[in-house]
Image: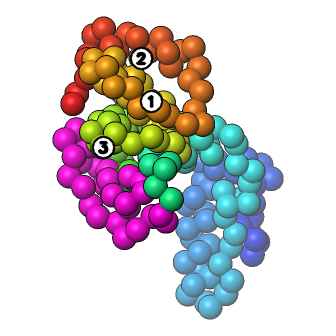
Amino acid sequence: MSTDSNGPDTTNNPPFGPNYFTELKKQVWDAVGSSQTIPTLDAMTRDISPAEIYYLLQRWATLAIWDVYNLEPASEKTLLTLPGVSPHFNVYDRGSCLVGSPKDLFSYKRSLEDGLMTARAMADEVQKRGWTIELSGFNKLVRAAWVQLQVNGSKNGKYLEVLHFTPNPNDVKLAQTETLYRGPTI
């Protein structure tokens, strides 16, 4: 297999074939050793699929719950310690909103369930505060927070008003099922 200054030759092997990275690594070190241009990496120039974008959104998922009638801009962040928050997420009180985000964006230990746990804990906190809310962020976290609010509302008779969110039939069914089997956490 021959090489050029633009990276490994992929004429006979598709990118990421069995020798691609070995050859690329050799080219990079040869270029560094001789003060030459480092070859390009095909992974950085190829198209990104919708599934890959969704994966990144899920890995870096955040949730913000806004107190819609508090018209103050988000203030300095204060780290909250809420029961039920995943150890892989931080929740901040910004005055007019709560924000949940991963502690370490690149952690392999964090899963989607960590985000869902955090969304439910944030929903419990705004339920205690009695806010009229708007949810923004990754769709699965938004849905988990809405379901938790419905579960809590059904048990304590105090449903929070949620603006600009229309649950789909599966969300409503999940809220009904969760109400029967789990109950409120506050």
CB within 8 Å, label 1 to label 3: no
Q: Judge the density around disc 3: few (<14), some (14-19), many (≥20) Cα neighbours within 10 Å.
A: few
Q: Earlier in the sequence, mark 2 or mark 3?
A: 3
Q: Quadrant of the C terminus?
A: top left
What's the amino acid at mark 3?
Arg
Number of marks: 3
On the image, the x and y values in percent for residue 19 come to 60, 53
Task: Name the residue tied to disc 3.
Answer: 129
Q: Judge the density around disc 1: few (<14), some (14-19), many (≥20) Cα neighbours within 10 Å.
A: many
Q: Which residues are magenta?
A: 72-99
Asked if residue 79 lies in the magenta stretch, the reply is: yes
What's the amino acid at mark 2?
Ala
CB within 8 Å, label 2 to label 1: yes
Residue at 26% from the left image edge and 21% from the top image edge = 156
CB within 8 Å, label 2 to label 3: no
Q: Quadrant of the N terminus?
A: bottom right
On the image, the x and y values in percent for residue 169 come to 57, 14
- Alpha carbons under labels 2 and 1: distance apart: 8 Å
Asked if residue 106 lies in the magenta stretch, the reply is: no
> Where 140 falls versus 85 (above or below)?
above
Checking the image for residue 175, the label placed there is 2
Task: Name the residue tied to disc 1.
Answer: 146
- Alpha carbons under labels 2 and 3: distance apart: 21 Å
Residue at 37% from the left image edge and 60% from the top image edge = 95
On the image, the x and y values in percent for residue 26 come to 57, 70
Q: Main secondary structure of the magenta part?
A: loop
Checking the image for residue 181, the label placed there is none
> Where 154 falls versus 164 (above or below)?
above
Q: Is residue 118 in view from this perspective?
A: no
Q: Nearer the viewer, mark 2 or mark 3?
A: 3
